[in-house]
Amino acid sequence: MAIDRATIEQIDATLLPQLDRHHLRVLSHCLDSFQAMAGREATGAIPDEDQRRLWCRQQPVVADDPAFLETLLQQLRAAADQLDQLAIALGKPPLALTLDDLINAAEARCRG
């Protein structure tokens, strides 16, 4: 699953520094991946470690590279923590977060 052009353009249209825009692209991609992992059975919570590992093992690019799999799972863990914290702050389930939520939070961080 790749980040789409519209998402990239929306992020790039912000006045955020380049590093913050890159972080937003990665976080948005992780959120999309978590939503795909959860599928129709989504409760709004980010899939747990076992669900993430199973999903990642089903991705052709990741399945054949155990070292990359572990690195990816580590990065997904960090993204899950960030998304959980933002969701708590906004009073909504993590999988209900939107790109606008991510952008607004990044802009607030940069202002503050």
Image (spheres, rainbow, N blue to C red):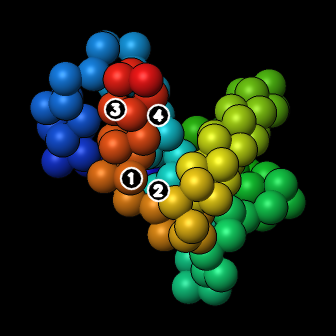
Three-letter code for the amino acid on which mark 4 is drawn: Val
In space, the residues marked 2 and 1 are separated at their CA atoms by: 14 Å
Q: Earlier in the sequence, mark 3 or mark 4?
A: 4
What SS does tag 3 mark?
Answer: helix
What SS does tag 2 mark?
Answer: helix
Q: Earlier in the sequence, mark 3 or mark 2?
A: 2
The answer to whether 101 is drawn above or below residue 17 in the figure is below
Residue 98: percent from the left, percent from the top?
38, 59
Disc 4 marks which residue? 26
Residue 33: percent from the left, percent from the top?
53, 55
Instruction: Kindly tell me whether residue 14 is visible in this rendering.
Output: yes
In space, the residues marked 3 and 2 are separated at their CA atoms by: 20 Å
In space, the residues marked 3 and 4 are separated at their CA atoms by: 16 Å
Residue appearing at x 39%, y 34% in the figure: 108
Residue appearing at x 15%, y 37% in the figure: 9
Q: Quick check: 56 left or right of 101? A: right
Q: Residues within 10 Å of mark 4 (few under 14, many from 20)?
A: some
Residue 96: percent from the left, percent from the top?
48, 69
What SS does tag 4 mark?
Answer: helix
